[in-house]
Image (cartoon, rainbow, N blue to C red):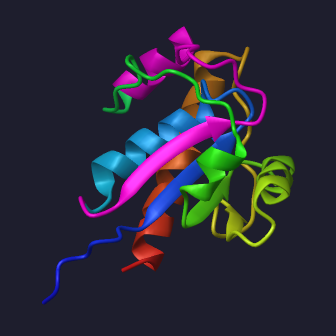
Amino acid sequence: MAENLNPERWLFVCTGNICRSPMAEEVARRLGPGTMVFSSAGTHAIPGNPATAAGVQVAAELGFDLSSHRATQLTGTVVAGADLILAMEEHHAAAARRFAPHATVELLDPAGAGIDDPYGGTAADYRSSYEAIVDAVRARLALGE
């Protein structure tokens, strides 16, 4: 069997790249095949911002580590490096399509539901969003098998 020299690259997109998309990136990196490359960006990210403290805490409770994450702004260059762009909400998908109108852009949830933004919310809000992200990433990875 030939080695895969062009791994599939997924880009997760949310607003600030400090809550949802870094969680999706981390989940995919931990659960996905080693031949794939996962990244994340935000439509209104401030480059270098860390994941929120509440997000880091809830992610750790679920077995994931967001402590070293730093935000990346969604740009044409970032989008160009992705084979599949998975957005948390439709407005994130629309922003990604503006950068790459011919790219494959879909909502992360294969059923087409948006993932609620926990920013500024309680730990329960983060837990709810993060559990939805884990479920959606698992479903996406299963679809790719």
For this view, does 95 lie left or right of residue 117?
right
Work out whether residue 89 or residue 104 is closer to the camera in this orientation and state it: 104
Question: Is residue 40 a member of the stretch shown in magenta?
Answer: yes
- Determine if residue 108 is in view: no
Work out whether residue 58 or residue 4 is closer to the camera in this orientation and state it: 4
Image coordinates of residue 101 in percent, x first then y, are: 81, 66
Image coordinates of residue 80 in percent, x first then y, are: 61, 57
Question: Is residue 105 a member of the stretch shown in magenta?
Answer: no
- Residue at image location 31% in from the left, 54% down from the top: 31
Give the quarter of the image for residue 5.
bottom left
- Residue at image location 63% in from the left, 47% down from the top: 77
Find the residue positioned furthest to the top: 53
* Quarter containing the N terminus: bottom left
Find the residue positioned furthest to the left: 1
Find the residue positioned furthest to the front: 77
- Residue at image location 76% in from the left, 53% down from the top: 96
Image coordinates of residue 74 in percent, x first then y, are: 69, 39
Count of numbered labels shown in the rendering: 0
- Residue at image location 44% in from the left, 16% down from the top: 57
Image coordinates of residue 102 in percent, x first then y, are: 76, 72
Find the residue positioned furthest to the bottom: 1
Residue 46 lies, with reference to residue 108, above or below; the image says: above
* Quarter containing the C terminus: bottom left
Residue 57 lies, with reference to residue 80, above or below; the image says: above
- Determine if residue 6 is in view: yes
The stretch of residues the image draws in magenta is 34-60
For this view, does 47 lie left or right of residue 15?
left
For this view, does 4 lie left or right of residue 136?
left
Work out whether residue 126 or residue 17 is closer to the camera in this orientation and state it: 17
